[in-house]
Amino acid sequence: MEAWARGVRGLLLDISGVLYDSGGSGGGVPIAGSAEAVRKIKASGLKLRFCTNETQATREKFVKKLQGLGFDISVAEVTAPAPAACRLLKERGLRPHLLVHDDLVPEFAEIDKTNPNCVVVGDAAENFSYANVNEAFRVLIGLEKPVLISLGRGRYYKETDGLKLDVGAYMKALEYACDVEAEVVGKPAKAFFESALAEMGVPPQEAIMIGDDIVSDVGGAQQCGMRAVQVRTGKYRPCDENHPQVKPDAYVNNLAEAVDVILSQL
Amino acid sequence: MAARRALKAVLVDLSGTLHVEDSAVPGAQEALKRLRSAPVTIRFVTNTTKECKRDLLERLTKLGFDIAENEIFTSLTAARNLLEQKQVRPLLLVDDKALPDFTGIVTEDPNAVVVGLAPEHFHYEMMNKAFRLILDGAPLIAIHKARYFKKKNGLALGPGPFVTGLEYATDTKATVVGKPEKTFFLEALRGTSCAPEEAVMIGDDCRDDVGGAQNAGMRGILVRTGKYRPGDEDKINPSPYLTCESFPEAVEHILGHML
């Protein structure tokens, strides 16, 4: 029954929906048992990395927020889209027009943003005003060779006051408007998971991804050869139990349950 | 060759067919009078997301056309009809100027979403409201899915991209009610007791007017006014039932050959 939890050397953990639910005046609410689960993983000798599509703030900022909520986490343990996007932009000589949350902008401090030749869209939340989306559209449609880079492609995520549109919806809007296809940096892109595994130093067959997004977290991780577990917290909805394409290696109620099972198999 | 059913209804496009901007197509007012002498039901049809029937009627009356408000059928009307059929209460993401066409429709505690061209409503908070309703099962109705349009100071996003984003986030498909959708043409005939095979559409947009109408089972007459460009008639298959100079010539053909 717990065969899925054997032969594991490292865990990739999603953050939003697994460790905590974001939103509200305090920045978020921890999910019961998650902070303790992280501590148990670290005490067990298993390797650990946080693999997130968080783009509403710099790594420093959201790690600080999570530490404030009681989590043992550091920036060095996090794989996030903005730094991956910066590497890509530098490699290809791309200068971005940013349609992102204000708090993410510092991640692009070293990037030349003059005379943009591409658009980078992230989870901009309130910054997804008509005017801002229109401005990004005008930049794209004006380019001879439109390049749209999307930090993730999630449909929605859970905040304390309910579900909210994620970057994927706006990525699709711009794709439709300009008749282009976006390049995704972040889950579920294979390169993103592979870089997280490389930084952790564990091959996919010996790693398990734990997430709340059945497509971006679970499906994406499985496509890299990892096992992946779906939690019933965060953005999980009962219809995820019957997803037409993705079959998680296990469904668990929450991170705490997943970790207890994994540790019992060591 | 199967016998043609008698013509019982004529659909007439407005902009580009009866008038171009603020000028009537020469001879159109007189041609409409002549068409009214025939035993056909007439409907004036147009895609619009922000002109209510009253405003359209005012414009046409000023140009000398004798038209009744209930003869006008727009994409907004099509949306309204769909709401009434489904008996749902809409969250209306439409221009304020379009609201008069939804008078009488209950909008409290919405369980449907209607999206027109309404930049003032396409901000994150409202989009989330629409998203949550649709995720919970509310039907998404799109007046049309235009990608963008031209404004004086540049291009501006139409409703299409926002509808697409909502479709993706909710994993649903919008019902699009404007031309060239089949629904539009079938709805225009509702209440006329005419079948599509008994109707003809006159318009200047080969794809949206003529192609759309013929796809719904009607015959289509393409006029060479408005946005017509030489060669347009070759762009649809089957080609238009007839291509002629303008609305007056279309009416002459109908009176002479189709009754």
Image: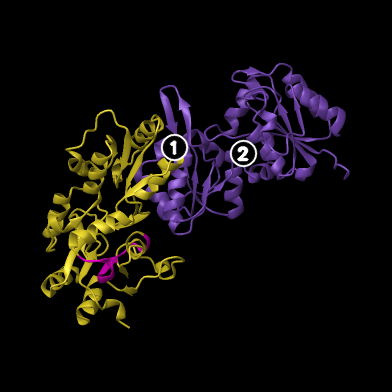
Chain colours: A yellow, B purple
* Mark 1–mark 2 CB contact (< 8 Å): no
Mark 1 secondary-structure assignment: helix
Q: Is residue A160 visible?
A: no
| Residue at which label 2 appears | B179
The residues colored magenta run: A202-215
Mark number, residue A178: 1
Taking the magenta stretch, the answer to whether it contains residue A208 is yes
In which image quadrant can residue B250 be found?
Answer: top right
| Chain of the residue on which disc 2 is drawn | B
Q: Is residue B211 visible?
A: yes
Mark number, residue B214: none
Nearer to the camera, A39 or B6: A39
| Chain of the residue on which disc 1 is drawn | A
**Residue B52 against residue B102 in the figure, above or below:** above
User: What is the three-letter code of the residue carrying label 2?
Assistant: Lys
Nearer to the camera, B53 or A109: A109
Which residue is rendered at x = 35% and y = 61% of the image? Answer: A220
Q: Nearer the viewer, mark 1 or mark 2?
A: 1
| Left or right of A104 in this view: B232 | right
Locate residue B37, reporting x and y percent: 83, 28
User: What is the three-letter code of the residue carrying label 1?
Assistant: Cys
Locate residue B119, reporting x and y percent: 42, 36
Which residue is rendered at x = 62% and y = 39% of the image? Answer: B180
On the rendered image, what quadrant is the C terminus of chain B found in?
A: top right
